[in-house]
Image: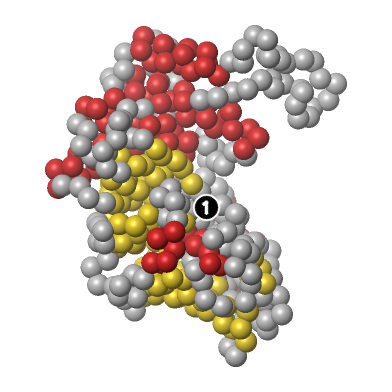
Amino acid sequence: MLLAKTRTLRPQRSRLPGRLVAAGLGHGRRACIALLLFLLPPGAAADDLYRVRFNESLQKVFVHACFDGRVPRTLYRHRSAGAFASAVRAGERTIRPAHDSTRVRLSSLADDACVSWDVDLKAALQQSDYRSSLQLEDGFITPGNLWFWRDGQRRPIVVEVELPADYSLSVPWQELPSHNGRQRFRPEPTPASWTSRIAVGRFEIHRIPVAGTTLRLALVGEMSPRQRDKLSRWIEVTGQSVASVFGEFPRNEPQILVVASGRQSRPVPWAHVVRGGGIAAELFVDPRYSARELADDWTATHELSHMLLPYVSRNDRWLSEGVASYYQNVLRARDGRLSEREAWQNCTAGLSAAAPPPATARWPKPCAKAGPPPCGFTGAARR
C-alpha cells in the first residue's frame, strides 16, 4: 500500500560522545574545566532579564528589561506598538521613538543598563484587526512584539511574568521553574522579525501528551465544557497522527491556541503556524461542529504538519506547503479518516490546482549554474 508507513530518516539530537565525557571526568579538574569551555559557545553571555507585569484590569502591561553587559543597539517591536506605548525610560533618560517606528535605539546606554516601557492594551485591542489582536471576554490575544520587544542579535533572555489572580498565559516560550510566585520562560533565540501569539485570560492550559512531547493547548473564547473536551480530543488525535511520521512529535512542547470564532461556514475558517520565540499553531474554530466534522476537516493536520520542517523562506514556500498538504491527506488516510482513494484524489486535485494554465506554463530548463528562477519551475503555484 502506498500509504503504509515508510522508514523516515531524521537528524539526530546533538549528543556529546560518551568517550569524550569519560575522558574528561577521568583526568581530574583541569580536564573537566577544558570540557566545559569546549561546550560553551563563543562569547556565551548571561541572560537578559525581562520582568513583565499585567495590571488587574489587563488594560496595561509593564515591561522592565535589564541587559547583561553591553546593551543591544536596537529593540524591535510591532509596527503598531508605538501608537499605544509609553516612552522608553532608562534611569533619568527618556527615549521617544517615532510612533510608526519598529525600532527603539539603545546604543548610547551604558553597560548593564535597564529600560522600561508600558503598552496600553485596551487601546490597542480596540483598533486592531482580529487576526492581529483579539479581545476576549476575560482577556486578549496579541502579537508578542506588541509589548515584548527584543534585540536583533538573538541574545539569551529569561522572562518573568506577574499575572492577576486566576489568569493564565499562553506563550510559545520554553517554561522554566517559577520564581517568587512569577512564571518564568526562555524564548528561543529566533530572529526579532518572526511573529508570535500571546494569550492572557481566564482559561486553562491543557497539557496533552503525545509521542515524544506534550502539546500546550489553550482553548480560548466562549465554549461549553463538552465543546472543550471535544476540541481537546481533536487536537490530541491530530498530534498523535503527526507524531507517527517520525515516531515522535517533531517539536518540543509547542504552543497550540484554539480560538472560538463564532458561527462559521466550516469548522476551521482560518489557521496558521508562527515561530517567533518558539513554534506555535493558532486555529480559529467554530465549536458548534461535531467531532466527526472536526475530524473530517484537514486544517489541523495541515498546520501541525508544518512542524515537521524547520523554517522555510517565503521564496521556497512550495516546499513547506507541499509537505503539509501531502501529509494532511496521507495521515488522515493512515488513521482511517480518509480512504486511500480519497487521499490520492485530494492530492491529485491539489496538484491540478497548483499547475499553471498551459498558455503561461514555464517548465524547468537546463541551467548552466545553480541559481534562482528562471532555473526551475516559475509558474504560479497556489493552494
In this picture, residue 109 sits left or right of residue 13: right
For label 1, the residue is 195
**Residue nearer the viewer, 301 or 42:** 301
Q: Is residue 239 above or below residue 45?
A: above
Name which quarter of the figure residue 364 lies in.
top right
Return the x and y of residue 206 as percentages of the image width and height: 26, 51
Q: Position of residue 208 (x, y in %)?
A: 28, 46
Is residue 231 rendered to the left or right of residue 60? left
Relative to 272, does residue 61 appear above or below in the rendering?
below
Who's the residue at 31% across and 61% down the image?
Answer: 139
From this view, report whether residue 238 is shown above or below residue 129: above
Q: Residue at x 31, y 47 (%)?
A: 259
Residue shown at 83% from the left, 25% from the top: 369
From the viewer's side, name the closer residue of 52 and 35. 52
Q: Residue furthest right?
A: 368
Q: Amino acid at mark 1?
A: Thr
The quadrant the N terminus occupies is top left
10 Å neighbourhood of mark 1: few (<14), some, or many (≥20)? Answer: many
Please state the horizontal and vertical placement of residue 215, each as a whole percent of the image.
Answer: 34, 47
> Residue 278 at what x, y percent from top left?
48, 52
Which residue is rendered at x = 21% and y = 27% of the image?
292
What residue occupies the far bottom of the structure in this picture? 92
Q: Secondary structure at mark 1?
A: loop
